[in-house]
Amino acid sequence: MEELFFFMVILAGIALYCLALFFFAVVAGPFVVLGTAAVFVGAAVVGYVRILIQTMSNPDPAQRDPRGFPPDREPEQAYRQYFFGPAMFDLRRILRQGQAGGITLFQDWGASITGRFITSPGFSPLIARPIGVALWAGLIVGGFGAAVLLAVVALLHALTIGVAQLVSRAAIGVLRGADTALLAAKGIRGMTCPHCYRKIDYPSYSCEAPDCSRRHRDVRPGRYGVLRRRCACGARLPTLLLLGSHQLPAFCPESECGRAMSDETGRRREQIVPLFGARAAGKTQLMAAIMMRLMREADRDRIPARLADDETSRAYRVLTEILQEAGHVTGTGPELPRARSIYLGSGRSERLIHLFDAAGERFTTVDRTDELEYFRAARSLLFVLDPLSVPAFRDTLRPQAQDTLDWSLASKEPPGLVFDQAVQTLIQMGAPAKRTRLAVAVSKFDLFDGLGSAPSRTSDSAACERWLTEELGLGNLIRSMRHEFGEVRFYFTAAVLTADGEVDPTIANLSSWLLGGERLPRQLRKLTTARPRAEPSAQ
């Protein structure tokens, strides 16, 4: 009887235990499973967010990982714009770390549940193990749910990066278009390198940060920045002229050149003015006189003008000192000439004037005319004609003046040869000569003024043209000039200083017409104001 009683008790206990398990599985178990799953998903999300914050809090991809687009391995030494590589790199890194962290979290939780509720429970295994099973079920559900949730988050992250990159690309296109439109509105259609003469769309810029001289070939909006780019040194550089990129040191982007361009290149419209003529025709001296006249008038606040760069400033000081002391400037050497650049005008009418003085032999040596690339962009040319090089000129002088004139100053090449070669160069380059203005400067007028049949220095263009045609027999050359160019003017010039140290008045009208051809006549008109005549200094 007792055995039956104990058996019944055992059966009752088993029944109660099974009932309790059923009750736990039906009533409490789901809450344990769902609660465990929710807590695990929350812990996984917190871990993912922590990894995300740790990654995004460091703005330097190279410090996050050596493979993260270090600037010293980029084509340009700058950090990539975040949505052009680093963002996807960060996403992959976050996903890798998030996956590893999720697996580690799952394993840690599983080991803890197994140890505390299944293999080594701290209380009755009959109670602990069902709880452990429920916790494991919740962990499995939570692991699956966390994987799905984080996959959705990663997908949204990737979509956000994709949309941001599209927006960035659109912004880049808009900004580049706005910059191009702004340049076109200012009449800026490219920039000319004063060294290699190539027409470029945008200069390279150098970083101005202390102890940094990294060259950025193209700072415009792109993969390295939209409004600003970050140099490898950490300095921020503007990407557009309208944002101030013209304030950076500009350089020619051509690899075989790479030399410094004028200050504030690209900010103002450029005007190319080549001086061409035979060797020893007086081009360099005439250019020095034109520059000196402009800067003297600027010093008197009569016209707005300023030298455009340090190299022009150094050359100007040398030229003016030689012109003041000796009255004769050494001609251009055989090396490629560097343009002398001047900002002329003010406000919207300001122009960057490039004066090119090429050595005369470039116009008589066919294989060297390809070095005259700047002629293609010029719309105003200055041909320097040395009358002393024309045989008929001697006959225009009085007999006693023929022997007193220093004929060693005469050019050795006839002006017609140089002019014809220059015209052929223009034709080969495809330059629109018919839309180009030509000023013809009859040089060295101070040497023969009053010694023969030449009109006075105040003579107009027609009188100068008649003298060249009728007295010097250059009718064919004059007709060729009229035929090739849209507009031609003739000037007697004396590139010397007067007794009171002023530039000879003959330079004023020439400068005004030559440089005033591109919407600057109102400001340059002051150059033609009559001044008291003074005798020129000795050559």
Image (cartoon, grey):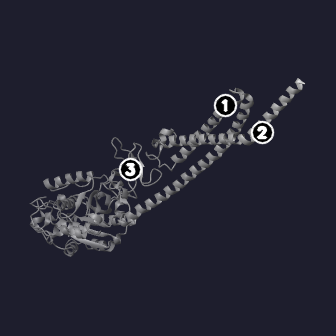
Disc on res. 192? none
User: Could you tell me the amino acid type at mark 3?
Assistant: Leu
Q: Locate residue 96: give its quadrant.
A: top right
User: Could you tell me the amino acid type at mark 2?
Assistant: Phe
Q: Locate residue 243: give its quadrant.
A: bottom left
Foreground of the two, 163 or 80: 163
In the rendered image, residue 462, in percent from the top left (x then y), is placed at: 21, 75
Relative placement, left or right, of 421 versus 38 is left
In the rendered image, residue 420, in percent from the top left (x then y), is placed at: 32, 66
User: Could you tell me the amino acid type at mark 1?
Assistant: Ala
Relative placement, left or right, of 445 versus 434 is left
Is label 3 in a helix, a strand or a loop? Answer: strand
Q: Which residue is mark 2?
A: 22
Relative placement, left or right, of 147 versus 321 is right
Inter-mark Cα distance, 1 to 3? 54 Å
Foreground of the two, 490 or 362: 490
User: Pointer 1 and pointer 2: residues touching (CB < 8 Å)?
Assistant: no
Disc on res. 111? 1
Is label 1 in a helix, a strand or a loop? Answer: helix
**From the image, which quarter does the C terminus lie in?**
bottom left
Inter-mark Cα distance, 1 to 2? 26 Å
Question: Crowding at label 3, few (<14), some or many (≥20) Cα neighbours within 10 Å?
Answer: many
Q: Which residue is mark 3?
A: 237
In the rendered image, residue 325, in percent from the top left (x then y), is placed at: 13, 53
Q: Nearer the viewer, mark 3 or mark 2?
A: 2
Does residue 350 sit above or below 455 in this rendering? Answer: above
Res 68 visible: no
**From the image, which quarter does the N terminus lie in?**
top right
In the rendered image, residue 402, in percent from the top left (x then y), is placed at: 13, 65
Relative placement, left or right, of 219 versus 93 is left
